[in-house]
Amino acid sequence: MIISRLSILLLVLVAGGCFGGAAGPELPLVAAQVQDLRDKGHRALSRGDVARAGRLFDDARRLAESIDDRPGLAGALNDLGTNAGFRGDPGKAAEFHRQAHWIALELGDRALIAESLSYRGQAAHLMSDDAAALAFYTQALALVREVNDRRGEAAVLNNLGLLQQAKGEADQAEQSIQRALALNSELGERRAMASNLSNLGTLSEKRGRWAEARSLYERALALDKETEQRPAIEADLVNLGQLSEVEHRLEEAISYYDRAYRGYRVLNQVPKAVDVLTRLIRVVKAAGQESLAATYQAELNTLTTKP
């Protein structure tokens, strides 16, 4: 019943920004250009433009290599790994993150090591290697606490909570994500807070606490709208649609699914648009609106027959 939970897993580190809170020393000109390309890539990801983000991250990688900017290269590799995860290639993501981790160890940069470990954890999670994911997250959590990186701690705790949720450890998952939410609230990290709230909503929904889940999803949607986080907005709408469908509030479900479908179409995320449109047709039929169902079916046929 829950859709796109792993998309939240990938989004959290992007939504929370890079690990580490305070700004570092001013970068030399070209190294600053590397960082600028990475920042532009992250903005593209927040708009749901995975292809453009990938090009920007690769440009950053090549520029960093050209001046032997090792920290910039490690960061760009982690960015490319995140992008690969969004494209549904966790094996490629794991390799990018492994390379970044190696550079971080070479540099002895504990914050960068922690960031790379956390990314390796999410790649392992995406590949269903729970033991490896837990090992990476445990190491990352110890390091971020050692260097007092509260933003990084929040990101690791959120992702650890998702792993615990996947393993059926609901109480532990709730504790981890609640702690992440508390940290992000203190830091004013609204984009990361939205991810935390959405994940807590999923836990509440699985426990049958539907009113609580609805409130959490609505709060996540409001924050994602404030910060213009696409496609997180669409994922929030789908979550609300699913919940409305379960509660037999069919008109609400139709509205939420339709809004999510339109958003995915604008973002050109065809597989997700197809998934949501399929759900929409099912609910419209259940509501007895056959003519509307036929209209949606024609749109689905067009989407699925495109080369």
Image: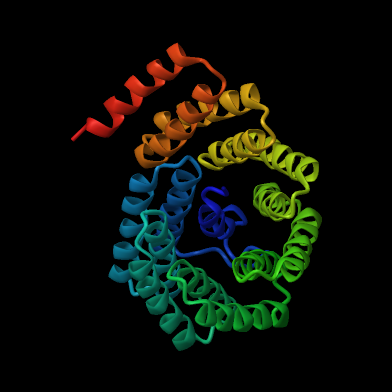
Instruction: Residue at 71%, 51% (x, y): give it.
Output: 193
Instruction: Residue at 48%, 52% (x, y): give it.
Output: 39
Instruction: Residue at 48%, 34% (x, y): give it.
Output: 279
Q: Quadrant of residue 19?
A: bottom right
Q: 187 or 301, which is in the foreground? A: 301
Q: Is residue 142 above or below residue 283?
A: below
Q: 243 or 146, which is in the foreground? A: 243
> Where is residue 72 drawn, in percent x and y?
43, 68
Q: 107 or 214, which is in the foreground? A: 214
Q: Is residue 266 above or below residue 181?
A: above
What kind of colouring is applied to the model shown?
Answer: rainbow
Instruction: Residue at 35%, 70% (x, y): give it.
Output: 91
> Where is residue 35 drawn, in percent x and y?
46, 58
User: Image check: 199 left or right of 254?
Assistant: right
Q: 102 or 95, which is in the foreground? A: 95
Residue farthest along the top direction in this orientation: 291
